[in-house]
Image (cartoon, helix red, strand yellow):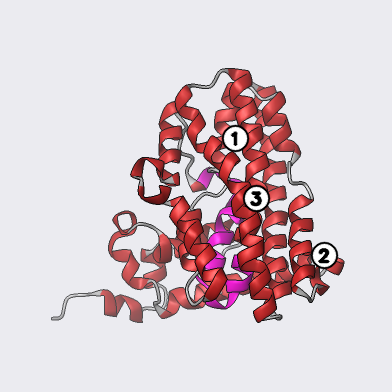
């Protein structure tokens, strides 16, 4: 008798989804995002974390489930985008850049960051940063995927950006390493996905949606550009909280780096990626703005939910 293997598992209608702990029919949006995040792990998570499950990345059942759940989500995202008004009708490269900057300027500093800088306790700051995940968590992998197939100025800009993420060759200065150092310095807890709110899960899943769907590359370029435009001012407010509360020295480098470098990255992303791409491929212009708007809208919902939860938890305590 031939022992059961991956092939026989694939032939069973639900066997593979069960083995991967994927819910074929999530009943709520929160469950949808939990399922999608597990699928995105098959595409982007470190192999030492997911092991042999990665071989099922493109299995028919997984692909069907992924496509079905993403289609429902994209209907919601596009319905929200339909309310964006004039932003959707930018045409020239100059209009696209202005629209990108308009999206970034609106609520560039959410009330949650102002609260963090001026009123949050140290425990609330640590919990906030644990959920925030850095202003651009996972940005290095996202920008690496995003540059595939680009040429010219945009290719060079994303490559330069990635090299900065890599600390320009200095391991100690790699942005993910700086974040690891921050985590150690403030004893930041790791929060399991199952304990995250719906808003937090949607925010975490957006990168996976964009990174695993090649046709959404214009939206991804816009979403990542928005992060660069907004991260600097937000990081400066985190540093204000650190100063006010006497944070340990090791907490500073990650946010200092982003406060100083990201404004430059944001300008270069507009001038050397967004504007040239909008000129070369006009159809991409509104789509890049749409990706930025998606990210902004999801971010704002997340930060409002996060502040509310931290304040309520503090009051209850």
Q: Does the magenta stretch include residue 211?
A: yes
Asked if the residue at tag 3 contacts the one at tag 2, i.e. Cβ–Cβ closer than 8 Å, the answer is no
- From the image, tell me which residue sits under label 2: 84
Q: Write down the quadrant of residue 280 in the picture.
A: bottom right
Q: Write down the quadrant of residue 98 in the picture.
A: bottom right
Quadrant assignment for the C terminus: top right
> Disc 1 and disc 2: Cα gap in Å?
29 Å
Q: Is residue 50 magenta?
A: no
Neighbour class for label 2 at 10 Å: few (<14), some, many (≥20)?
A: some
- From the image, tell me which residue sits under label 3: 199
Q: What stretch is highlighted in magenta?
A: 194-221
- Secondary-structure class at tag 2: loop
- Secondary-structure class at tag 1: helix
Residue displayed at 54% across by 43% down: 134
Asked if the residue at tag 2 contacts the one at tag 1, i.e. Cβ–Cβ closer than 8 Å, the answer is no
Residue farthest left in this picture: 1
């Amino acid at each position: 008798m031939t022992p059961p293997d991956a092939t026989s598992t694939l032939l069973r209608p639900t066997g593979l989804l069960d083995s991967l702990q994927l819910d074929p029919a999530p009943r709520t949006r929160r469950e949808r995002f939990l399922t999608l995040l597990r699928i995105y792990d098959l595409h982007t998570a470190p192999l030492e974390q997911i092991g042999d499950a990665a071989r099922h990345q493109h299995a028919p059942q997984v692909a069907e489930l992924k496509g079905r759940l993403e289609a429902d989500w994209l209907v919601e995202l596009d319905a929200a985008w339909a309310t964006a008004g004039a932003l959707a009708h930018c045409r020239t490269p100059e209009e696209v850049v202005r629209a990108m900057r308009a999206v970034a300027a609106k609520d560039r500093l959410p009330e949650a960051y102002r609260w963090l800088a001026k009123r949050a306790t140290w425990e609330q700051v640590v919990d906030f940063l644990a959920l925030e995940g850095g202003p651009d968590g996972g940005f290095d992998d996202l920008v690496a995927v995003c540059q595939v197939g680009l040429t010219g100025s945009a290719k060079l800009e994303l490559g330069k950006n990635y090299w900065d993420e890599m600390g320009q060759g200095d391991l100690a200065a790699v942005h993910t390493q700086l974040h690891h150092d921050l985590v150690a310095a403030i004893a930041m807890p790791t929060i399991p996905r199952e304990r995250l709110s719906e808003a937090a899960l949607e925010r975490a899943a957006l990168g996976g949606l964009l990174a695993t769907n090649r046709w959404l590359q214009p939206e991804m370029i816009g979403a990542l550009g928005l992060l660069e435009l907004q991260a600097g001012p937000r990081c400066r407010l985190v540093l204000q909280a650190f100063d006010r509360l006497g944070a340990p020295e090791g907490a500073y480098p990650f946010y200092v780096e982003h406060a100083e470098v990201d404004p430059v990255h944001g300008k270069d992303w507009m001038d050397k990626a967004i504007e040239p791409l909008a000129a070369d491929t006009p159809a991409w212009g509104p789509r890049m703005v749409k990706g930025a708007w998606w990210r902004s809208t999801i971010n704002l919902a997340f930060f409002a939910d996060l502040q509310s939860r931290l304040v309520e938890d503090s009051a209850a305590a």
